[in-house]
Image: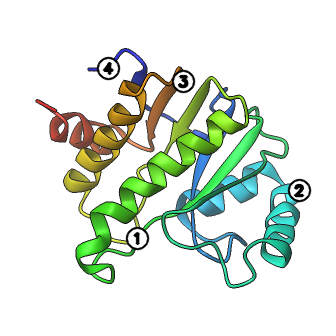
Amino acid sequence: MHNHIKIKTGDITKEQVCAIVNAANSSLLGGGGVDGAIHRAGGRTIFEACKEIRATQYPDGLPTGKAVATTAGVMDASYVIHTVGPIFGSCGSECKTLLASCYSNSLKTALELGCKDIAFPAISTGIYGYPKEAAARIAYQSVKEFLDEGHDITVYFVFHNDLDKSIFEESIQGL
């Protein structure tokens, strides 16, 4: 495994990293799962920053695969990088590319912000229905390729429970 990639179980909203990634919906205005947890933990300033992004940059919502940063509010992280994963079953042959873009665009955004570490949830594997094993391979490969380009950033994959962590670890064996 790449020495800049760490896999753990925990609460992503409590990670002490420069940036945490939000598996957002295109509205950027909160939702369920990781999205709701980040909005609740970070406080109103995240919601207000997202409203401003919607008013200025993305009036029709953040496109799938893109990434945008806001404050992390009252969380320990400095930033939240919001990205919209693909809805499995609705993205056809573009699913893999769109999911990979979530990771690579989030990493690029983190570097632009000067971050040395970032924490990712399992993007699109909740209500968006992406199969966890396939999503794990795409996530790991996308991050590994980014790091292999010489970028100096530590990446944490943070899972809500040990089962999802073990599915991820088993799915990336041999990559």
**Dot 3 corresponds to which residue?**
153
Looking at the image, is mark 3 or mark 4 earlier in the sequence? 4
Q: Three-letter amino acid code at disc 3?
A: Ile
Identify the image quadrant of residue 4: top left
Q: Is residue 101 left or right of residue 42?
A: left
**Dot 4 corresponds to which residue?**
2
Whether residue 45 is situated above or below residue 20 in the rendered picture:
below
Q: Is residue 56 left or right of residue 116?
A: right
Residue 140 visible from this viewpoint:
yes
Q: Residues within 10 Å of mark 3 (few under 14, many from 20)?
A: some
SS state under label 1? loop
Q: Residue sitting at 34 percent across and 32 percent down?
A: 144
Looking at the image, is mark 1 or mark 4 earlier in the sequence? 4
Choose between 54 and 148: the one closer to the eye. 148
Q: CA distance from mark 4 to mark 2?
A: 35 Å
Q: CA distance from mark 1 to mark 2?
A: 26 Å
Foreground mark, 1 or 3, reads 3
Q: Residues within 10 Å of mark 1 (few under 14, many from 20)?
A: many
Disc 4 + disc 2, Cβ < 8 Å: no
Please provide percent x and percent y for residue 90: 32, 83
Q: Which mark is residue 86?
A: 1
SS state under label 3? loop
Q: Which mark is residue 45?
A: 2
Please provide percent x and percent y for residue 32: 57, 69
Q: Is residue 14 left or right of residue 96?
A: right
